[in-house]
Image (cartoon, rainbow, N blue to C red):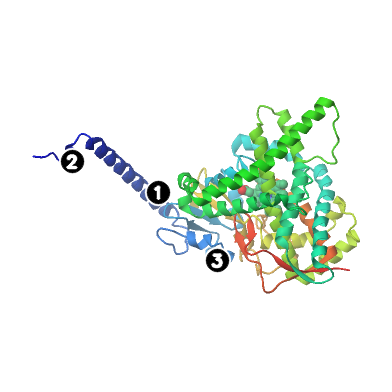
């Protein structure tokens, strides 16, 4: 009788390999099943929106409509679990007491979002953990001290005025509709180029930097898409996907750009030292601070660390600022009475705006209230996340086990009807001293709070004030009713179709 194929010599190893793989697959499937059962059990105290068994709530939040999130915030008090695929949960919280409990801990950043950022930013302040994060934060904090920030006011004003000169040319004497987000993005890039790298690039007037700006925009879009597509959570699938390839191209553009600037600065410093002709720069930029941190800590601060921190500042400070300024302008366009009140205040302090100083910025109290209200309505960083390293018990007694990814939805918190009356209404009086004092301190967190709060928040507030003051002195802004602003919640909030405003040059 002929032997069956299983009895052939070549078939045995193949058969064994097949059985082995099957057993492995089965084991993995059992593990995933048990994980899902455990998650379902742990999360049962927290009601969730109806979910698809395979996609979970992926479709709900991937489409990025903030209205959907607001509906859920109204319906599920404090928190709800959001399933991304059958085995992964992002636990959304948006209650001040929950936020306080969450931010007072030192859980590591969630491996999803932040791991996805590493190819772009490298391992800098945003993604580092533990003693290395502490060391970098300690070394870089002096870069944001009062004296350094003070010297940036003039630099910022110069960049804002460059943008306004462009707007004057576009508008002439007439009222003209302009897509302002692109202009503002270039302006914030210009400011960072000068404050981080002392680069006078003329990026607002020449197009040589378009590639860098487009690369930051596209990279952020791909990373957000990856976050809500659970198959792309696996490196092996993502790397070989078209988006993975595209991201690699974008990262190459971003890194080459900053690397060249760093190398040029190092060469310059070396030559200055060699020939003893050290030139005193007008102000100290972040690269100076980081280079001196490196000089003091040669062994602990490598060239890779240096490059990562430069990339981190350039990217963390650009999109956030472009959004912050654009949303503020949009909100003031929609609310002309508040726009006019800000303008009056600014005129009273700055006159014609030919110069602007640090002390004057401190006097803009109504404008600051409008800035805060805009940051509440449209927080440029809509959410942050951590992976619980140990169980957490919230003040209402409900708990979560270690290992869960918790997302603090800053947008959800800022639109929570339990804290904010008429949350959709632009009302700067919410930020009067009296009203602020009565609110839970964790109700308003555009820059997060606790040890990992935004290192650039003072810088950001200065830039917002300088930008809005100079814009309002030269232009009246009103909305284009045919093109309302629609937000895309990527890592940083983005406009879906730009920000269109009527600009009218003031006499
Ligand atoms: C309106 C503008 C800005 C907003 C709303 C904002 C918001 C935030 C938030 C919410 C975080 C916490 C992130 C987390 O916990 O995962 C953060 C962290 C950070 N931000 Fe900002 N940011 C702004 C501007 C800036 C600027 C201008 C810079 C730098 C020039 C900057 C640099 C950073 C860095 C380096 C971190 C990480 C800090 C750490 O973990 O130690 N940000 N920012």
Where's residue 131, x and y in %?
Answer: 61, 34
Query: For mark 1, what is the residue?
Result: 35
**Badge 2 local density, few (<14 within 10 Å), some, or many (20+)?**
few
Q: Nearer the viewer, mark 1 or mark 2?
A: 2
Query: For mark 2, what is the residue?
Result: 5
Which disc, if any, is residue 122? none
Residue 228 placement, left or right of 381: left
Element under disc 1: helix
- Whether the residue under disc 3 has CB within 8 Å of ligand 1: no
The reply to whether residue 432 is in sight is: no
Cα gap from disc 3 to disc 1, whole angstroms: 28 Å
Of the numbered discs 3 and 1, the one sitting upstream in the chain is: 1
Q: Nearer the viewer, residue 339 or 274?
A: 274
What residue is drawn where x is 58% and y is 43%? 119
**Badge 1 local density, few (<14 within 10 Å), some, or many (20+)?**
some
**Badge 3 local density, few (<14 within 10 Å), some, or many (20+)?**
few
Query: For mark 3, what is the residue?
Result: 68
In the picture, the quarter occupied by the C terminus is bottom right
In the picture, the quarter occupied by the N terminus is top left
Residue 251 placement, left or right of 141: left
The reply to whether residue 162 is in sight is: yes
């Amino acid at each position: 009788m002929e032997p069956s194929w299983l009895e052939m010599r070549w078939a045995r190893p193949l058969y064994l390999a097949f059985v082995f793989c099957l057993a492995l697959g089965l084991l993995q499937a059992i593990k995933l099943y048990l994980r899902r059962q455990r998650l379902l059990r742990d999360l049962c105290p927290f009601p969730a929106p109806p979910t698809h068994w395979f996609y979970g709530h992926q479709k709900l939040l991937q489409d990025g409509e903030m209205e959907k999130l607001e509906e859920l915030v109204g319906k599920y008090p404090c928190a709800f679990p959001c399933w991304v695929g059958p085995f992964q949960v992002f636990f959304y919280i948006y209650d001040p007491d929950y936020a306080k409990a969450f931010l007072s801990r030192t859980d590591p950043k969630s491996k999803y979002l932040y791991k996805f950022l590493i190819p772009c930013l490298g391992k800098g302040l945003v993604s580092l953990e533990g003693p290395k994060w502490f060391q970098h934060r300690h070394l870089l904090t002096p870069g944001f001290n009062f004296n350094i920030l003070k010297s940036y006011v003039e630099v910022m004003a110069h960049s804002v005025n460059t943008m306004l000169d462009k707007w004057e040319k576009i508008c002439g004497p007439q009222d003209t509709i302009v897509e302002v987000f692109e202009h503002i993005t270039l302006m914030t890039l210009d400011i960072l180029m000068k404050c981080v790298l002392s680069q006078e690039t003329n990026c607002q007037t020449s197009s040589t930097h378009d590639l860098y700006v487009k690369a930051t925009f596209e990279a952020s879009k791909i990373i957000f898409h990856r976050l809500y597509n659970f198959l792309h959570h696996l490196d092996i699938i993502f790397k070989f996907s078209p988006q993975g390839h595209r991201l690699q191209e974008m990262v190459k553009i971003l890194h080459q750009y900053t690397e060249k600037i760093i190398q040029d600065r190092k060469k310059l410093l070396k030559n200055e030292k060699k020939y003893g002709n050290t030139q005193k720069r007008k102000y100290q930029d972040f690269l100076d601070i980081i280079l001196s941190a490196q000089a003091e800590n040669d062994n602990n601060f490598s060239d890779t660390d240096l490059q990562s921190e430069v990339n981190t500042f350039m990217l963390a400070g650009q999109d956030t600022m472009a959004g912050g300024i654009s949303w503020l302008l949009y909100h003031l366009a929609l609310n002309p009475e508040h726009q006019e009140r800000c303008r009056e205040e600014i005129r009273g302090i700055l006159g014609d705006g030919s110069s602007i100083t640090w002390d004057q910025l401190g006097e803009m109290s109504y404008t600051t209230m409008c800035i805060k209200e805009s940051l509440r309505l449209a927080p440029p960083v809509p959410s942050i996340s951590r992976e619980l390293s140990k169980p957490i018990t919230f003040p209402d007694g409900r708990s979560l086990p270690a290992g869960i990814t918790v997302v603090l939805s800053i947008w959800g918190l800022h639109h929570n009807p339990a804290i904010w009356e008429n949350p959709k209404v632009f009302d700067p009086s919410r930020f009067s001293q009296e009203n602020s004092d009565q609110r839970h301190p964790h109700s308003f967190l555009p820059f997060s709070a606790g040890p990992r709060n935004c290192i650039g928040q003072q810088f950001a507030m200065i830039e917002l004030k300088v930008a809005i003051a100079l814009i309002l002195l030269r232009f009246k802004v009103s909305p284009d009713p045919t093109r309302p602003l629609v937000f895309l919640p990527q890592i940083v909030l983005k406009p879906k179709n730009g920000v269109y405003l009527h600009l009218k040059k003031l006499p």
